[in-house]
Structure formats: C-alpha cells, structure tokens
Amino acid sequence: MTKIENELQYQITLKRVEELMLNLPEDTPAEDPRMVELTLLGNLVADYDEEHYPIGKPSLISVIKLRMYEMGLNQASLSKLLGINPARISEFLSGSREPTLPQARSISQKLNIDPAIVLGV
C-alpha cells in the first residue's frame, strides 16, 4: 500500500499504529520488523491526516488569548505590558481592528509570538 485510499483503511491503519505503539518497548531497535511496520504505517496515517484533516494557521486573536492565559494577563495588564490603549486591545481581541506595525512588533516581542502570525502571513 502506498497511500491510504479511504476512511475505512485509515481507521484500520490507525488502530494498528495504536496497537504497535502500546506494545513496543521504548528501546525497540529501528531494525525490528514491528518498528519498521510502525514507521511505515505512521507515515501513511500522517499523510492521510494532512490531506483530510489539515490544521489551519492559528489566528492572531487565538494566539494572543492563549498567551494572556499562559501569562496570567487580563486586558488591562496586557495593555500595560504592550503600552497600547485598552480600547485598542479590545478591538484587536474582537477582530474589529488590526495592529499597526509598531504595535505588531511589540506584540511579537513582548508576548513571544512569531512575527508571521502577528502579520498574518
């Protein structure tokens, strides 16, 4: 098999991958036939996942909210940290306004967010 063709094949292959993962010891050598099988089937599952269940790029809003949660920030403290007016922060989080380039730079640097996400590229 060079490619998983349908959902039934995917489910069967995924079940076999899970069985192998649960039953192989961590120190199983790469040359072990079961490890070779796991690697090959895992690649097939990953290819099918990418094609049929793609994960989209995260939005700036979702990443900012995640960072706020991770850093224990509310909108007021985020405003202070970034040096951006609280009303602007609210507009960013509602999606009604995009940050300016200097604001985007501050968001990227102070929240450690990839510039590509901040710039939407």
Image: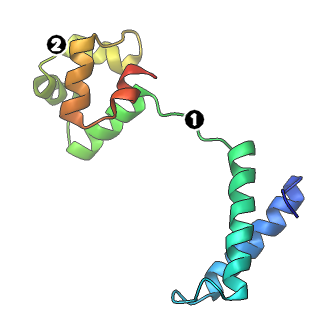
Compared across the picture, whether 76 is left or right of 47 comes to left
Q: Is the residue 19 above or below the residue 9 in the image?
A: below
Q: Secondary structure at mark 2?
A: loop
Name the quarter where the N terminus is drawn.
bottom right
Q: Is the residue 88 above or below the residue 10 in the image?
A: above
Residue 106 occupies which quadrant of the picture? top left
Q: Spatial distance from mark 1 to mark 2, Cα to Cα?
A: 30 Å
* Residue density around tag 1, few if under 14, some if 14–19, many if 20 or more, within 10 Å: few
* Residue density around tag 2, few if under 14, some if 14–19, many if 20 or more, within 10 Å: few
Provide residue 51's location: percent of width, then percent of height. Answer: 73, 43
The three-letter code of the residue at mark 1 reads Gly
Which residue corresponds to the image point at 60% horizontal and 83% vertical from the top-left?
A: 30
Q: Secondary structure at mark 1?
A: loop
Query: Which disc number belongs to residue 28?
Result: none
Which residue corresponds to the image point at 23% horizontal and 11% vertical from the top-left?
A: 87
Which one is nearer the viewer's eye here, 83 or 49?
A: 49
Provide residue 12's location: percent of width, then percent of height. Answer: 83, 68
Which residue corresponds to the image point at 35% horizontal and 21% vertical from the top-left?
A: 93
Provide residue 89's location: percent of width, then percent of height. Answer: 25, 18
Q: Which residue is mark 1?
A: 56
Residue 15 occupies which quadrant of the picture? bottom right
Residue 25 occupies which quadrant of the picture? bottom right
The three-letter code of the residue at mark 2 reads Asn
Q: How is the image coloured?
A: rainbow
Which residue corresponds to the image point at 63% horizontal and 79% vertical from the top-left?
A: 21
Q: Residue furthest front?
A: 31
Q: Is the residue 57 above or below the residue 35 in the image?
A: above
Q: Earlier in the sequence, mark 1 or mark 2?
A: 1
Provide residue 101's location: percent of width, then percent of height. Answer: 27, 12
Query: Which disc number belongs to residue 85?
Result: 2
